[in-house]
Structure formats: C-alpha cells, structure tokens
Amino acid sequence: MRKIHIIVKGVVQGVSFRYFAAYNARHLSIHGYVKNLYNGDVEIGAQGEQQNLQIFLDKIKLGPPAARIDDIKIEEDPEQIEYDSFEIAY
C-alpha cells in the first residue's frame, strides 16, 4: 500500500475536478480525499495499491474536459493516517 499527496495547478476549480477525481479513485479502490484550496489549486491525498495509483495519476493528469492542468506535484505522504473511503472535502 502506497500513500501520496498531490497538488494540481491550473484551471481545476469550478470544472468538476473534485467529482472527477472522486469517481476515478472510487472506481480504482483508492482511499483518501480531494479538496479545493484557497489559492485555486486542488489537493488530493490518495492511498492504494501502486498499480491503481498509477492509473489514477494518469487520469488526474488528463483531468475532466473543462479543466486545464498546468502542473502537478506528487510526493510520498509520510502521514500515518489510514483512509477507509475516498471523500470530497469542503
């Protein structure tokens, strides 16, 4: 099980990006969260099997049709929190 922290920059708010991320995460059995940040970015915490996380990242890099992805930062997440679902945080 691997855990990553993702920051997505670009036109990612107001374009259903969080719902897109949640749908794909749930479909791939990835747990964690997605939330809008005040600076216009989107933050994702994701935990799952390496292969599923890679598929998830590939989908996130494309985003929903109305989004424009300018940059994605991906880091290993050292937090010891275990997620049991994937939630849209507000």
Image (tube, grey):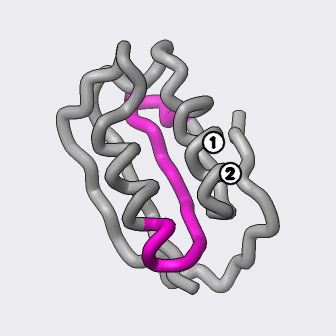
Q: Mark 1: few, some, or many residues within 10 Å (few <14, many ≥20)?
A: many
Q: Position of residue 62 (x, y in %)?
A: 30, 36
Count of all numbered marks drawn on residues in the image: 2
Q: In the drawing, does residue 37 fall left or right of residue 67? A: right
Number of the label disc, if any, that sits on residue 22: 1
Q: In the drawing, does residue 81 fall left or right of residue 7? A: right
The amino acid beneath tag 1 is Ala
Q: Position of residue 16 (x, y in %)?
A: 53, 20
Which residue sits at x=48%, y=76%? 77
- 34 vs 29, nearest the viewer: 29
- 39 vs 35, nearest the viewer: 35
Quarter of the figure with residue 57: bottom left
Q: Position of residue 73 (x, y in %)?
A: 27, 56
Q: Is residue 87 above or below residue 67?
A: below
The answer to whether residue 23 is magenta is no
- Residue assigned mark 2: 26
Q: Is residue 8 above or below residue 30?
A: above
Which residue sits at x=78%, y=59%? 85
Quarter of the figure with residue 70: top left
Q: Mark 2: few, some, or many residues within 10 Å (few <14, many ≥20)?
A: some
Marks 1 and 2: in contact by CB < 8 Å? yes
Q: Which residues are magenta?
A: 36-53
Quarter of the figure with residue 51: bottom left
